[in-house]
Image: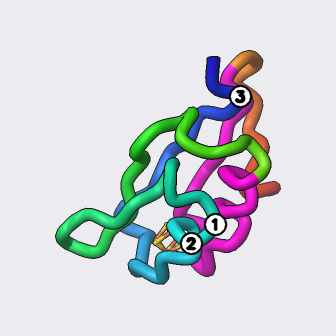
């Protein structure tokens, strides 16, 4: 089971692709240059979290898949 649940706020994404650079198995850009989730198990949990933290607009929210607790961004 994936460690994290990933939610991409697509209206916040500006296509900077740093998430893709850090965790390409989890994040990719679609043909509109907006990120989407390929697989929540497509990369290591560390890279998935780093990818989210690298997003300049905080367009990626990360939740603990087990508890549902929000991991990123921190409020
Ligand atoms: S890092 Fe953020 S803005 Fe850039 S592609 Fe990923 S989700 Fe979009």
Name the element at disc 2.
Answer: helix
Is the residue 5 above or below the residue 16 in the image?
A: above
| CA neighbours of label 1 inside 10 A, class few (<14), some (14 to 19), many (20+) | some
Is the residue 44 above or below the residue 5 in the image?
A: below
What residue do we see at 48% from left, 76% from top?
Answer: 17
What residue do we see at 67% from left, 33% from top?
Answer: 4
Indicate the position of residue 30 as horizontal and vertical percent values. 25, 63
Q: Quadrant of the C terminus?
A: bottom right
Indicate the position of residue 15 as horizontal and vertical percent values. 40, 78
Which region of the structure is painted magenta? Answer: 47-65
Q: Quadrant of the N terminus?
A: top right
- Let me know if residue 51 is in the magenta part: yes
Marks 1 & 2, CB-CB < 8 Å contact: yes
Indicate the position of residue 62 as horizontal and vertical percent values. 66, 44
Residue 68 in the figure: left or right of residue 5? right
Marks 1 & 3, CB-CB < 8 Å contact: no
Q: Which mark is residue 13?
A: none
What residue is shown with label 1?
Answer: 22
Q: Which mark is residue 3?
A: 3
In this picture the colour scheme is rainbow
Is the residue 52 above or below the residue 6 in the image?
A: below
| Distance from the alpha carbon under mark 1 to that under mark 3 | 17 Å
What residue is shown with label 2?
Answer: 21
| Distance from the alpha carbon under mark 1 to that under mark 2 | 4 Å
Mark 2 or mark 3: which is in front?
Answer: 2
Residue 48 in the figure: left or right of residue 40? right
Give the mark nearest the N terminus, 2 or 3: 3
Q: Quadrant of residue 74?
A: bottom right
């Amino acid at each position: 089971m994936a460690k994290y649940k990933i939610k991409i706020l697509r209206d916040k994404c500006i296509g900077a692709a740093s998430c893709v650079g850090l965790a390409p198995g989890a994040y990719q850009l679609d043909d509109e240059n907006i990120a989407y989730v390929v697989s929540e198990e497509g990369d290591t949990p560390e890279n998935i979290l780093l990818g989210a933290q690298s997003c300049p607009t905080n367009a990626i929210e990360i939740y603990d898949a087990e508890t549902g607790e929000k991991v990123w961004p921190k409020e």
